[in-house]
Amino acid sequence: MNQNSLTGAAATPHSGATAAAHRAFAEGGNAVDAALAAAAMLTVVYPNQCTIGGDAIAMVGTPDGNVTVVNGSGRSAHTTDLNKYIGPDGFVPVAGALSVTVPGVLSAWEVLADKWGRQPLAAALLPAAAVAKAGVTVAPGVARDLMREQHLLSQDAGCREVFFQDGVVLKQGETLKLVRLAETLTRLAEDGVNAFYRGPLGESVLETLRGLGSELTRKDLEDHQATLERPASVEFAGTEYLSAAGNSQGTFFLQGLAALDVVAYELGRIPDPDGEDAGVIAGILAAAARDRDQYLGDPSHREVPVDALLSRETAAATAQRALTRSLSGSITGRTYARRTGDTVAVVTADSEGNWVSLIQSAFHAFGSCVLDPGTGILLHNRAASFSLVPGVANELRPGTRPPHTLMPVLVRKDGRLVGAHGTMGGRAQPQVHTHLALNLALGMAPDAASARARWIIGQMEAGAAAVDDAATIAVESGVSDRAVQALHAAGFRSKELEAFDDAAGHLQVVRLTEDAASFAVGSDPRSDGLLADGT
């Protein structure tokens, strides 16, 4: 078990970002400063999975045990013309300018720094700018996504300039130079994030997007604000798990966990995802996924019934159905060619009792695959989560937040914060978090719990055109035969994944040890992470 002193701890999916968090602690920063340093660095070293042209949702826990959600997710254009958003296949495009909503990550970072940080946001931005200017070695995960997405990246002038050399996409070990992005990060450090939302950086991005058909305007950027929200929570195995509600799928992770708490009571033990209980667990996760696709959207337009979904009555009914192994239906939709990547998670904690789970993304790998040449800002593709079907929860409307995969997680026990969890994984994030929660409750250390072989229902990819076949489970090499047999017995089909496959997510974990003397840290071997303490 990797343990760090009580000064501070961090886990991220890239060694450069973890080192940035380490430096922030060493320079006197707290958990928020460390998280921001890592988050800024990740937009440079992991452009396939996050960008300052993307979104972020974070949770901050303070020494008194209180937890606040910072929702930085952006909205569709306030002048949205639905007819323009119908792609050739009848859905919102998953790439290109029409897939871009207002980027919200910078607004979330600003709120985090101003409200809870010890250092100015510039302290996180300038080191990232220096690395962007000098160039960064293309990590294995970035190289894989460059190869997979080169057909889309090659269609955009800004992406060709950054991610290709002599007409060939960059490969692992080669140097990625982000000179314009370095200039942009420096400008943001000097002038603040209003240089984007109300200044020349945003205007440059809007000009590029308008030239490609986007309806986003200066008013859309100016009107954007990150919001402070209350988390939702449930009890599982004597521990309280908290996540974002609203337009975040965190509610549906908690829904499944509440049902599993009932299962644990009925069985008299913690159900094991790598054992005979796998079928029961999968039935619960499939049920929560069906509810997510029915209810998740912008609650300002249609209420998400959080209280009902997290009630003991719903948990008991869901648990009973799963225990009787009744697989009732599946999520339906339309299949499109697989897009890769999506998200990064940063988790931190410090000796003062501050905890952060910060999740940010480009959505699909390299987002919209549109990069503004003037600023070096790559834009996400969150509009792909909207549906064009009238009346559904995720219907595309003017000025609307999309349903969001991003779901930070914090953990409390007896009123004291004891854990910060995060993962990439698109639609599968609730499942990946559930595997972690079960493994920890079974007594595993965070590093072992993160590394343990997993199985995933359906596909990670999110978008209105996606299909989640709730009867098919992708099983990593290393999952026990007993678990696979239990999944089959419960009516599921299985397909094989390689060991430590990206499709099983990238968990990042910080937990307070039982004696409260140190932090235990887990960084998923499926990512390019490195563990570092804050001493």
Image (cartoon, helix red, strand yellow):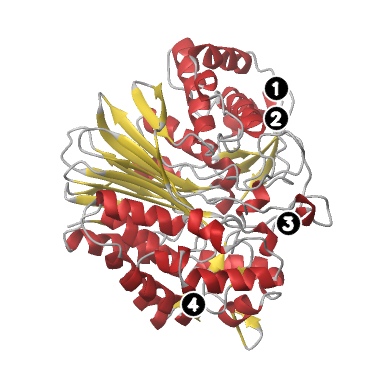
Contact check, label 3 and label 4, Cβ < 8 Å: no
Q: Is 365 located above or below residue 176 in the figure?
A: above
Q: Which mark is residue 93?
A: 3
Label 2 crowd (10 A; few <14 / some 14-19 / many >=20):
some
Camera sees residue 1: no
Picture coordinates of residue 493, whole percent (x, y): 72, 34
Label 3 crowd (10 A; few <14 / some 14-19 / many >=20):
many
In this rendered view, identify the residue nearer to me: 480 or 226: 226
3 or 4: tag closer to the N-terminus = 3
Picture coordinates of residue 333, whole percent (x, y): 77, 40
Could you tell me the amino acid type at mark 3? Pro
Q: Which mark is residue 492?
A: 2
Camera-near label (3 vs 1) is 3
4 or 1: tag closer to the N-terminus = 4
Q: Which mark is residue 327?
A: 1
Camera-near label (2 vs 3) is 3
| Left or right of 337, for residue 440 | left
Picture coordinates of residue 162, whole percent (x, y): 56, 79
Contact check, label 2 and label 1, Cβ < 8 Å: yes
Residue for badge 4 = 173
2 or 3: tag closer to the N-terminus = 3
